[in-house]
């Protein structure tokens, strides 16, 4: 099967086949089934490692927790954006490059 177009919303972790106009940024990518599955794993991983403010405030003196969680979140985010860049349209690549995170 060929590649299909997806619109990825990193903030919500959603991937759709139709770009829904709203106030959130989406990244248009072209992916085959294998790439789509990998992208979903990256989105799940990023959501899994999001900074948990509640946990941080409940353990404010445990600096190792917050630093390690933040490092893991940063790594997940970079992996996700590298893959979005790889699969993305010219416009998507330009958006990601303008973020300065790669």
Image (cartoon, rainbow, N blue to C red):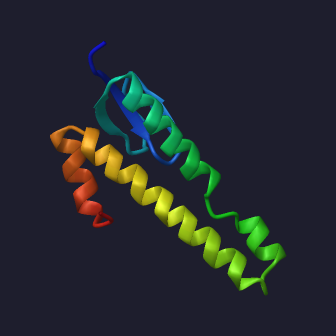
User: Hey, which quadrant is residue 59 in on the image?
Assistant: bottom right
Residue 60 in the figure: left or right of residue 19 = right
Q: Residue furthest bottom?
A: 61
Q: Quadrant of the C terminus?
A: bottom left
Q: Indicate whether 95 appears above or below 36.
A: below
Where residue 71 appears, as percent x and y from the top left, is 54, 71
Q: Residue furthest left?
A: 90
Q: Is residue 70 visible?
A: yes
Q: Residue at x 34, y 46 (%)?
A: 83
Front-most of residues 44 and 12: 44
Q: Residue at x 26, y 16 (%)?
A: 2
Q: Residue furthest front?
A: 34
Q: Residue at x 41, y 54 (%)?
A: 79
Q: Quadrant of the N terminus?
A: top left
Where residue 95 appears, as percent x and y from the top left, is 25, 52
Q: Indicate whether 99 appears above or below 12.
A: below
Where residue 38 appears, as percent x and y from the top left, is 45, 36
Q: Is residue 13 visible?
A: no
Q: Residue at x 41, y 29 (%)?
A: 36
Where residue 47 appears, as percent x and y from the top left, is 59, 49
Front-most of residues 16 and 66: 66
Q: Residue furthest top?
A: 1
Residue 71 in the figure: left or right of residue 9 = right
Front-most of residues 26 and 29: 29
Q: Indicate whether 18 appears above or below 63.
A: above
């Amino acid at each position: 099967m060929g590649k299909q177009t997806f619109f990825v919303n990193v903030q919500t972790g959603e991937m759709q086949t139709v770009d829904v106009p709203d106030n959130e940024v989406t990244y248009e990518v072209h992916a085959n089934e294998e790439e789509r599955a990998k992208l979903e794993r990256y989105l799940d991983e990023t959501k899994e490692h999001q900074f948990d403010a509640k946990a941080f405030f409940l353990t404010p003196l445990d600096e190792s927790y917050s630093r390690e969680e933040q490092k893991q979140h940063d790594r997940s985010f970079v992996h996700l954006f590298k893959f979005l860049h790889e699969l993305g349209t010219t416009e998507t690549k330009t958006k990601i490059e303008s973020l300065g995170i790669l």
